[in-house]
Amino acid sequence: AVEMAKVQELLSTKFAITPTTFNILLAIYNNKEDFDRVWREKSEIGAHKENEIILLAKLLPLTVDEIKKSLVILRNVGLLGKKGLTDAAIKLVESYLTLWKGINT
């Protein structure tokens, strides 16, 4: 997953993948249809970002500021694109889920 993300950004970001940022990736992954709908909406340029934040706030016990900061980090390191998770983010989440399933079986 790292090879497909922005390696230099990952290296320069002290804690790119934290429990908070990963939980946001996981929430987007698990609610793909809802986020696809938010990103498809043809509203004002900044409005879909606000809808994205509102949806994440409903799904996760995080403050709006925590969500905004995490989204900036995820975009900067190449794990979140303009219209969804990047391939690197999907591989990261799926790797975690595979590992978790293997541990719990």
Image (cartoon, rainbow, N blue to C red):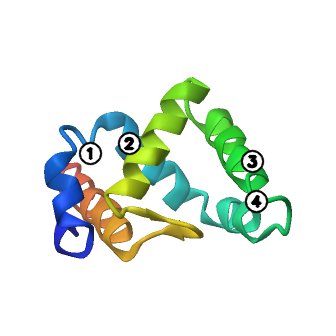
For the residues labelled 1 and 3, the Cα–Cα distance comes to 23 Å
Q: Quadrant of the C terminus?
A: bottom left
Secondary element at tag 1? loop
Q: Nearer the viewer, mark 3 or mark 4?
A: 4
Residue at 43 percent of width and 56 percent of height: 75
Identify which amino acid the numbered label 2 is placed on: Thr
- Along the polypeptide, which appears first: circle 4 or circle 1? 1
Q: Marks 2 and 1: CB-CB under 8 Å?
A: yes
Identify which amino acid the numbered label 4 is placed on: Ile
Identify which amino acid the numbered label 1 is placed on: Ile
Q: Which residue is mark 4?
A: 45
Q: Marks 2 and 3: CB-CB under 8 Å?
A: no
Residue 17 circle label: 1
Question: Where residue 35 sits in the image (x, y, percent)?
Answer: 66, 60
For the residues labelled 4 and 1, the Cα–Cα distance comes to 27 Å
The reply, left or right, for residue 88 in relation to residue 74 is left
Question: Where residue 39 sits in the image (x, y, percent)?
Answer: 70, 65
In this view of the protein, can residue 61 be seen by the observer?
A: no
Secondary element at tag 3? helix
Question: Where residue 59 sits in the image (x, y, percent)?
Answer: 62, 38
Question: Where residue 38 sits in the image (x, y, percent)?
Answer: 74, 60
Along the line of sight, which residue is nearer the eye, 69 or 19?
A: 69
Q: Which residue is mark 2?
A: 21
